[in-house]
Amino acid sequence: MSAGGQPPDPRSISKAEKTGTTPAETEMTRPDAQPTASHFIDGAYVEDTGGDAIPVIYPATGETVATVHAATPAVVERALASAVRAQVEWAAMAPVARGRILRRAADLIRARNRELSVLETLDTGKPLQETLVADAMSGADALEYFGGLAADVTGATMQFGGDWAYTIRKPLGVCVGIGAWNYPTQIACWKAAPALATGNAMVFKPSETTPLCALKVAEILHEAGLPAGLFNVVQGRGPVGAALTTDARVAKVSLTGSVPTGRKVAAAAAGAMKHVTMELGGKSPILIFEDADMDDAVSGAINGNFYSSGQVCSNGTRVFVHESIAADFLARLTERVATATLGDPLDEAVNFGPMTTEAQLDIVLGHIARARAEGATVAAGGSRLDRPGFWIGPTILTDLTDDMACVREEIFGPVMSVLTFRDEAEALARANATDFGLSAGVFTRDLARAHRIAAALEAGTIWINQYNLTPAGMPFGGSKASGIGRENARMAMDHFTEAQTIYVGMGPVDSAY
Ligand SMILES: NC(=O)c1ccc[n+]([C@@H]2O[C@H](COP(=O)([O-])OP(=O)(O)OC[C@H]3O[C@@H](n4cnc5c(N)ncnc54)[C@H](O)[C@@H]3O)[C@@H](O)[C@H]2O)c1
Ligand SMILES: CCCCC=O
């Protein structure tokens, strides 16, 4: 497919720059991001500077805005011990009372959305325009949803003609949550809400890259009335996550992260038969048929590739477009992508931010260099932007084949691969030809085709004529290498409980002798 010309550098149309926002002005609006202390344990902030210092870098400028310390073994011990103690009473509490606390936390989050969104922006670099609607608000939705469901955890009865049995769903005990860096508030809430609603305690380790927001979630949960010890936050890198995963007191590990980390964590948990939820990476397809609403398809591809600067697990980074509309699609796509507004993410006019880390930016640039070397055309973006921080514009690759690395591997950045197809069977086969299976999208006006394709796609979540929307009442998670289990919806309650079966004998007991 031909590139159709290089669009203007998105920096040249930054509204922030047009409106004359200066670094000095945005500096003035930036709050102090330094938390009271690194960890939140047993209802209070805890510091132990014996752990490695972890700088928190504002990705838009590269400045260090806070420093936390990795948990020492003593900190990990305090977190686990308080969770074990607190969980017993919490599990015995009336579920409706547990739910009330979570719903109160949801209200507090909504009331403080702006403050939390600014912190999320400082933590991740994602535009405030996004964080105001997608992060703390999504966390509040999960707390409200699971708070409402807490009193509705039910078992089943089975009749055997006299004798009968019933099941009750019991909490697992102490659960560990481990987060990725792209949605720190949302990930903390999506894990904490179903775990707490069902009577568990959680020790949460945020990503070392974005350690700030989970501390605020802990603070708010406790302000809402959560007893001390039930949601503890400890900081650290992989070894802290590994120490939590392998501790004998931990019944379950819920990880959001990459497939390689998922394999390690699942293997470590399997050694002690712990429950796991694995929310991992993907290389998801979006199939755009010739009868699709073109504007919606372009919007879906933009949302599914460039929101959060492409750092979204479920992104549809392999965009398969029917060959008869491919030229029109690419022309409209490049035209719209050229209007992205880059600038200080704290400026609400900005809708495209930097990569969250320089290391991730380097990974993205490496993928683009390899794609060029393999013969791809860069139809938009493609290079590091000459400004402080970790910037690359929305990037579109064309002239691709399915065996190129950029089409096969998760890039986790703003890089869309546009491919063409001739017929449905071919599109489906190519969409499924991956070890990943997180998500997929279909754009068509043909309802029968939409549902036929959705059923045949090997992915945990499929969007028809939409992309990347994840309401709390909808299960979300991956197939194949992209994960085990589901977050959100009633299914998440099942994943944080286990069934106990009680058989009831109603007559005499027969025995052989
Ligand atoms: N499916 C989803 O819901 C979802 C959501 C967001 C991100 N992701 C995926 O996350 C990845 C990006 O995030 P990342 O770079 O932070 O992932 P990562 O795998 O590098 O790290 C994830 C978390 O695991 C921890 N960790 C690393 N090694 C560990 C070990 N041995 N034991 C326990 N914990 C360990 C890290 O400290 C971090 O907190 C991408 O692949 C993305 O697709 C998935
Ligand atoms: C669509 C939001 C899911 C979070 C993954 O990165």
Image: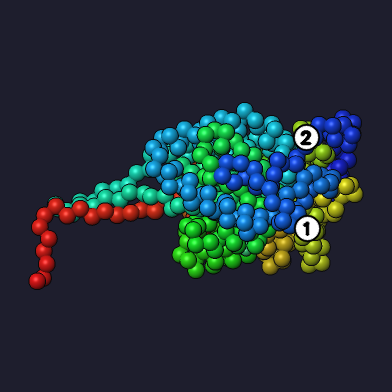
Mark 1 secondary-structure assignment: helix
Residue drawn 46% across and 65% down? Answer: 273
Q: CA distance from mark 2 to mark 1?
A: 26 Å
Query: Residue 492 location in percent, x, y?
Result: 47, 48
**Residue type pointed to by label 2:** Pro
Q: Which residue is mark 2?
A: 31
| Image quarter hosting the C terminus | bottom left
Front-most of 184 and 271? 271
Q: Is residue 95 left or right of residue 196?
A: left
Please name the residue shown 71% across and 65% down the image: 405
Q: Is residue 151 above or below residue 202?
A: above
Residue with the most extreme top position:
111
Q: Earlier in the sequence, mark 2 or mark 1?
A: 2
In this rendering, would 359 be left or right of 506? right
Can residue 151 be seen here? no
Instruction: Say which residue appears at 90% left-offset and 49% top-offset.
Output: 386
